[in-house]
Image (cartoon, rainbow, N blue to C red):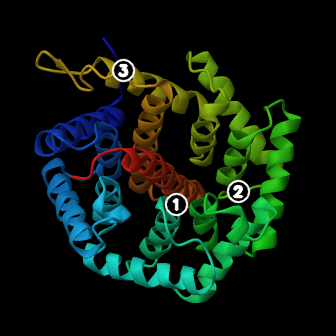
């Protein structure tokens, strides 16, 4: 029998209840999107979570163009984020439209999923209102600094994470320098170069630490993951970075992810497995397990409310925002290939 501590079991049981209800209500919606959407509202009472996610997703669909991202199953993930943060969906949709207009005025990519996700992250950080043009400019400058090219030439792929950094009010050159230092520190510790290492460096740069501290934290998480039979290949570098950001004990975090992953794979509802007959890739299962462990970590820190834990709490919340961005980006890929419901 899989042993979960009380906090993790509460998160997993809540996730299962929410996902089961969503799957029953939306039988023809992409299962992958619903799995990600359920994570966004886990921690809320299940009935409330499903009702508010549904209401937000419906409001987004009504307010958006029928061919745009808000008309696809991606709206369930975005709606879940709004429901968790208590933001009115109709207000956020207006803010999203106005913010994307700013993208267009500044000659930035404003079509497609990644641009919409970046604008959504800016708007949700602003409690649903459109943002000032200065914030759009800072987002663009950060993304351009990462790619080394003008954003209109490099495309919109870097925009979502750039938006997370932009709302922290950091200067673009400071963010770029921090990411470069962390990337170098990770490479010095033997992590393989490439797109996934770059993503990990950008996530770790959300924390308040030196490059060496960030790299050491991620390496400790990776070593703990291996001890619990999780092999953080390059495709899983972002999960290791998110766990490092939370500031918890690496062994405890890695053990939590391993046990949650196993519980999700084996969980049955009657005679039916939670995830049905669909075979999930390791990255998706671990991504969901990581999200649930991070949610448990934030709930724990909020209960403690100690001054000594304040830095870790801030890091954990930043990690959750980054996890939401990663989930939305993954959902956008699924949504672009699935029928609109």
Sequence order check: which comes first, mark 3 or mark 1? 1
**Rendered location of residue 205, percent (x, y):** 70, 56
Of 48 and 316, nearer the camera is: 48
List the residue tagged with mark 3: 279
**Rendered location of residue 183, percent (x, y):** 81, 47
**Rendered location of residue 225, percent (x, y):** 60, 24
Query: Residues under labels 2 and 3: Cα distance?
Result: 34 Å
Labels 1, 2: front one = 1
Sequence order check: which comes first, mark 1 or mark 2? 1
In the image, taking residue 77 as reference, residue 241 lies left or right, namely right
Q: Secondary structure at mark 2?
A: loop
The quadrant where residue 39 appears: top left
Q: Secondary structure at mark 3?
A: loop
Query: Residues under labels 3 and 1: Cα distance?
Result: 27 Å
Labels 2, 3: front one = 3
* Disc ID at residue 212: none
Sequence order check: which comes first, mark 2 or mark 3? 2
Q: Secondary structure at mark 1?
A: helix
List the residue tagged with mark 1: 114
The residue shown at (68%, 51%) is 204
In the image, taking residue 56 as reference, residue 203 lies left or right, namely right
Of 317 and 118, nearer the camera is: 118
In the image, taking residue 242 as reference, residue 287 lies left or right, namely left
Of 139 and 185, nearer the camera is: 139
The residue shown at (30%, 32%) is 9
Q: Is there a contact, CB below 8 Å, between mark 3 and mark 1?
A: no
List the residue tagged with mark 2: 205
């Amino acid at each position: 029998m899989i042993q979960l501590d009380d906090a993790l079991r509460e998160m997993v049981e809540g996730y299962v209840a929410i996902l089961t209800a969503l799957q029953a209500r939306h039988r023809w919606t992409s299962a992958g999107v619903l799995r990600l959407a359920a994570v966004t509202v886990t921690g809320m009472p299940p009935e409330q979570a499903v009702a508010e996610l549904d209401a937000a997703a419906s409001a987004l669909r009504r307010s958006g163009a029928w061919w745009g991202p808000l008309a696809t199953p991606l709206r369930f993930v975005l709606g879940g984020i709004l429901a968790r943060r208590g933001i009115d969906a109709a207000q956020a949709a207006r803010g999203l439209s106005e913010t994307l207009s700013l993208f267009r005025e500044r000659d930035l990519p404003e079509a497609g999923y990644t641009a919409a996700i970046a604008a959504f992250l800016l708007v949700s950080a602003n409690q649903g209102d459109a943002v000032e043009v200065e914030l759009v400019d800072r987002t663009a400058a950060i993304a351009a600094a990462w790619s080394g090219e003008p954003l209109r030439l490099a495309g919109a792929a870097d925009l979502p994470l750039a938006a997370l950094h932009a709302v922290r009010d950091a200067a673009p050159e400071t963010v770029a320098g921090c990411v470069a230092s962390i990337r170098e520190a990770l490479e010095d510790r033997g992590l393989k170069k490439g797109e996934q290492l770059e993503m990990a460096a950008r996530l770790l740069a959300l924390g308040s630490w030196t490059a060496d501290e960030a790299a050491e934290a991620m390496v400790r998480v990776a070593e703990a993951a291996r001890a619990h039979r999780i092999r953080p290949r390059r495709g899983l570098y972002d999960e290791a970075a998110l766990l490092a950001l939370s500031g918890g004990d690496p062994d405890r975090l890695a053990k939590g992810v391993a046990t949650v992953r196993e519980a999700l794979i084996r969980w049955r509802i009657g005679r039916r497995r939670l995830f049905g007959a669909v075979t999930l890739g390791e990255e998706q299962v671990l991504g969901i397990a990581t999200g649930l462990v991070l949610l448990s970590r934030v709930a724990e820190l909020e209960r403690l409310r100690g001054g000594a834990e304040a830095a870790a709490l801030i890091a954990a919340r930043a990690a959750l925002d980054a996890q939401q961005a990663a989930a939305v980006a993954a959902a956008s890929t699924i949504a672009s290939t699935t029928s609109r419901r």
